[in-house]
């Protein structure tokens, strides 16, 4: 029988490289924000708004790839070799990258509708056009990462992500300010740096799969259909959640550049903290998926308990840091006093929803390992779009709370989503007790 202490060590050993990789990927975005903030307030505001348009497309479509690792882990649990699925995963990933690129380019047509300052609008459009072509590298990286992750091989992919942090800072600084022999590209340099670093990540990780290049290049259309079927609800869940946060940024952009810049900082710090429970979620989806393939109810229960305990412990620590001592973190981004003042206000609400955020993403990972994704997407839609965003809109625009109103709505939405996912998991576990007994 698997003990909790053993399960905790296994989960932490598996999740640690994923955590480093996810933090690395997030630090790439943080590097963008820091360099943008050092360049100008306008650049910081524009990049945040551009990311708010691009992320709902690019990151949401990665959800179609997130289905690969739990499905492959279940096959491993059944004793099947998964090398034969390698090229299927690669072709599937490239198809998703093409879709992501096209949709990002089409999103450019929406920007004038927001009626931002003409200078900001121009910068947003330029950023989106350039970064749309980075989806090939991004999706190639994620596809190979999912394949490795299904085998609980996490070091290589996440080491590449950590190296990419330094590569990104180098490209950002060089392209924006014209250093190290690079042309001075100003704000556009941020987009060119994103294109360069994502291409580096995809190609670097693909080189590590050279042993699999000689496997039969046969596409398993049935497995591709399985990934698509499981991935669609994951993508919808990600879209509803990411779009909720991004729509807040777009709405806050209506108030002033100060609040927009502060919102971008609070969002970046909250997202950085989110990477750890998100990594736990990715790890537990594979662990639970493998146990589900083995039909081992005890292991499923133990990994459920350990993953939730780990995520909630971390988010409690981050909530304390954000509430008690936010200043050192905020000053990494800017020394602009009005921006810092607003960032402190918004980070208070980020502290308030840390526990709920950690719980809901971990529960989502557990459910993904049990092949439950549709009800998760429904819960996220209800929490954010029927309750959180409408409430935030009212508090922000009609109750005079401005940017703070939207973050209050997000905090309530996360609490409701965590509650609904908890109920869904409890019902599934009861069903499994009857099924396996």
Image (cartoon, rainbow, N blue to C red):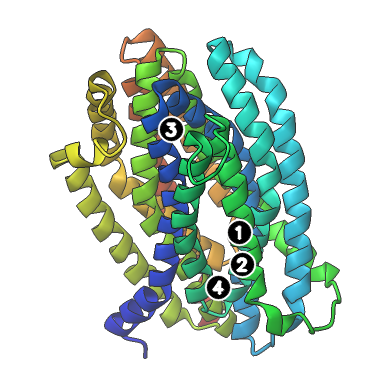
Q: Is residue 120 above or below residue 316?
A: above
- Report which residue position mark 1 lands on: 200
Q: Nearer the viewer, mark 4 or mark 3?
A: 3
Q: Which residue sits at x=30%, y=46%?
A: 354
Q: Whole-Å distance between the Cαs marked 1 and 4?
A: 20 Å
Q: Is residue 413 above or below residue 301?
A: above
Q: Earlier in the sequence, mark 2 or mark 3?
A: 3
Circle on res. 149: 4
- Report which residue position mark 3 lands on: 36
Are discs 4 and 3 less than 8 Å apart at CB?
A: no
Are discs 2 and 3 less than 8 Å apart at CB?
A: no
Q: Which residue sits at x=22%, y=21%?
A: 337
Q: Earlier in the sequence, mark 1 or mark 4?
A: 4
Query: Residue 220 location, x and y as percent?
Result: 83, 72
Q: Quadrant of the N terminus?
A: bottom left
Q: Whole-Å distance between the Cαs marked 2 and 3?
A: 26 Å
In the shown orientation, is residue 225 left or right of residue 232?
right
Question: Quick one: label 1, few (<14), some, or many (20+) residues within 10 Å?
Answer: many
Q: Which residue sits at x=57%, y=52%?
A: 197
Q: Secondary structure at mark 2?
A: helix
Q: Which residue sits at x=25%, y=26%?
A: 340
Task: Determine the image quadrant of residue 396.
Answer: top left
Q: Earlier in the sequence, mark 3 or mark 1?
A: 3
Q: Earlier in the sequence, mark 4 or mark 2?
A: 4
Q: Secondary structure at mark 3?
A: helix
Question: Quick one: label 2, few (<14), some, or many (20+) residues within 10 Å?
Answer: some
- Report which residue position mark 2 lands on: 204
Query: Residue 18 location, x and y as percent?
Result: 45, 67
Are discs 1 and 2 less than 8 Å apart at CB?
A: yes
Q: Earlier in the sequence, mark 4 or mark 3?
A: 3
Are discs 3 and 1 less than 8 Å apart at CB?
A: no
């Amino acid at each position: 029988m698997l003990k909790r202490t053993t399960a905790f060590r296994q989960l932490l050993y598996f999740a640690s490289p994923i955590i480093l990789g996810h933090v690395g990927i997030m630090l790439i975005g943080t590097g963008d924000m820091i360099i943008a903030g050092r360049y100008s307030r306008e650049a910081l505001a524009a990049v945040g708004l551009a990311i708010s348009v691009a992320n709902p497309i690019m990151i949401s479509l990665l959800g179609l790839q997130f289905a690969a690792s739990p499905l492959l882990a279940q096959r491993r649990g059944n004793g099947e070799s998964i090398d034969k699925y390698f090229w299927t995963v690669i072709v599937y990933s490239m198809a998703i990258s093409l879709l992501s690129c096209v949709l990002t380019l089409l999103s450019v047509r929406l920007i004038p509708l927001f009626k931002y300052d003409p200078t900001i609008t121009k910068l947003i459009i330029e950023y989106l056009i350039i970064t749309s072509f980075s989806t090939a590298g991004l999706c190639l990286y994620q596809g190979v990462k999912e394949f490795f992750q299904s085998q609980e091989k996490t070091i290589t992919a996440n080491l590449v992500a950590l190296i990419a942090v330094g590569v990104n800072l180098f490209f950002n600084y060089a392209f924006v300010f014209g250093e190290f022999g690079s042309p001075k590209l100003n704000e556009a340099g941020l987009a060119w740096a994103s294109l360069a670093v994502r291409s580096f990540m995809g190609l670097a990780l693909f080189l590590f799969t050279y042993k699999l290049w000689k496997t039969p290049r046969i596409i398993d259309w049935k497995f591709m259909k399985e990934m698509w079927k499981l991935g669609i609800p994951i993508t919808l869940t990600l879209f509803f959640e990411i779009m909720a946060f991004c729509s807040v940024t777009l709405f806050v952009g209506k108030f002033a550049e100060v609040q927009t810049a502060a919102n971008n900082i609070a969002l970046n710090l909250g997202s950085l903290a989110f990477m750890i429970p998100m990594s736990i979620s990715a790890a537990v989806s594979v662990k639970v998926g493998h146990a589900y393939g083995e039909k081992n109810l005890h292991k499923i229960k133990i990994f459920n308990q350990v993953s939730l305990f780990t995520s909630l412990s971390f988010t409690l620590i981050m909530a304390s840091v954000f509430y008690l001592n936010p200043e050192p973190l905020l000053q990494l981004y800017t020394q602009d006093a009005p921006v810092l003042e607003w960032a402190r206000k918004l980070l208070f609400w980020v502290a308030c929803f840390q526990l709920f955020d950690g719980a809901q993403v971990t529960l989502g990972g557990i459910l993904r390992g049990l092949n439950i994704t549709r009800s998760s997407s429904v819960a996220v839609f209800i929490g954010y779009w029927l309750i959180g965003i409408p409430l935030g809109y009212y508090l922000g625009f009609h109750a005079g709370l401005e940017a703070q109103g939207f973050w209050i709505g997000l905090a309530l939405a996360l609490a409701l989503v965590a509650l609904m996912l908890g109920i869904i998991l409890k019902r599934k576990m009861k069903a499994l007790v009857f099924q396996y007994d």
